[in-house]
Amino acid sequence: MSKLFSPLTLRDLTLRNRTVVAPMCQYSSVDGSANDWHFANLARFGMGGFGLVIVEASGVTPEGRISYGDMGIWKDEHIAPLKRIVDFLHTQNAAAGIQLAHAGRKASTPIGWRHGFDETEDEKSSHGFQSWTPVAPSALIHAENSSFTTPTALDDAGIRNIIAAFTDAARRADEAGFDVVEVHAAHGYLLNQFLSPLANKRTDNYGGSRENRMRLPLEVVESVRAVWPARKPLFVRISVSDNADAAGGWQVEDSVVFARELKARGVDMIDCSSGGFAEGKIKPEPHYQVAFAKAVRDGADIATTAVGLIRDPKDAEAVIASGEADLVALARGALENPNWAVHAQLELQPEDKDYSLWPVQAAGRIRDRDKVLHQRGFATL
């Protein structure tokens, strides 16, 4: 049997296989609410056979969104449209996750496909346009260009509010029926900003030493774990490396220490990415982040997710079979082919002719077509 298509149990949740759709911003919300686009986009991944589908980075506060078009989970009105998505994913036997996020100094940036803030007045009204001054550990701009704003440094009250916002968001995620929450501490966003000396220049208990820089992310995780049901797994996404060693950034050995602390606080899975700061330099190539997942898995004795240009099913199988990671996540690859998982299973398990991972409405028809054409598992008939 394929290792990629074997189940994985985390606490009381059993994933039907080891394939994950990583959270991807859609820049299509108004006031943070999920809508028909989000439903259709995410539903197809459940029908496509993935084991876990994670909803995009969802702001725990309005000011925590990357852009005004990002999803949110800062108020109770966000629960019902999210629950609609969760309920459908469950009908397809896929687990549903949501990434709880705060962008920090990378907030209030333009919609991804626009040319800066070029909205017309009519578009601003219909799309829920907003702009604001972001917050961060220190009053340092992410990069000197038109897309970013110099942030305000968080004071003690602001830090307490951030912790409360993540906690309240986790409660809402549970009410919406999510199986997994993932705390976003990667990609140069707020919690990652506290971790990295590239962004954190504080001189109080939240800055300076690695122990101090880890303090806020760990306090957030402790508070989230306290309200997130014990039967449900908790994920944390981290940038294992800032990819900025020359600039003195966060490095792999820091992530191993951090992961051990997360595990001690009840985290079940580390989603291993990298980068996020302007000082970071790395050449993306197939599997370029898999080594990070292995380093954290081995160093902290905790389950990990590998992500980053993993496209070929046989390569994904090798990641799991070799013990480099416990889950494999696709992002753009899933957008390109929402049926990647059902196709991959037929490639890795050609002897399995029941097409059970396909939706029942499609399974028999696809199977009959393949049999007539003598393809996939029927190629030798």
Image: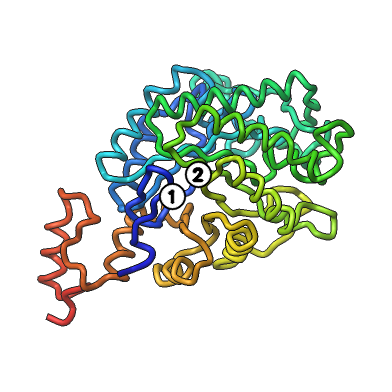
Q: Nearer the viewer, residue 222 or 156?
A: 222
Q: Amino acid at mark 1?
A: Val
Query: What numbered label is drawn on residue 24?
Result: 2
Q: Is residue 377 above or below residue 77?
A: below
> Is residue 270 visible from the viewing direction of this image?
yes
Alpha carbons under labels 1 and 2: distance apart:
9 Å
Q: Are marks 1 and 2 in contact (CB under 8 Å)?
A: yes
Query: What numbered label is drawn on residue 240?
Result: none
> Is residue 66 visible from the viewing direction of this image?
no
| Residue 76 percent coordinates (x, y) | 46, 17
Query: What numbered label is drawn on residue 21?
Result: 1
141 to the left or right of 258:
right
Residue occupying the point 78% across, 29% down: 151
Q: Nearer the viewer, residue 373 or 77?
A: 77
Q: Nearer the viewer, residue 232 or 51?
A: 232
Residue 144: quadrant of the picture: top right
Quarter placement of the C terminus: bottom left
Q: Which residue extends farthest right?
A: 203
Residue occupying the point 27% across, 70% down: 349
Q: Which residue extends farthest bottom?
A: 380
Residue occupying the point 80% across, 22% down: 155
| Residue 323 percent coordinates (x, y) | 50, 67
| Residue 278 percent coordinates (x, y) | 76, 49
Q: Amino acid at mark 2?
A: Met
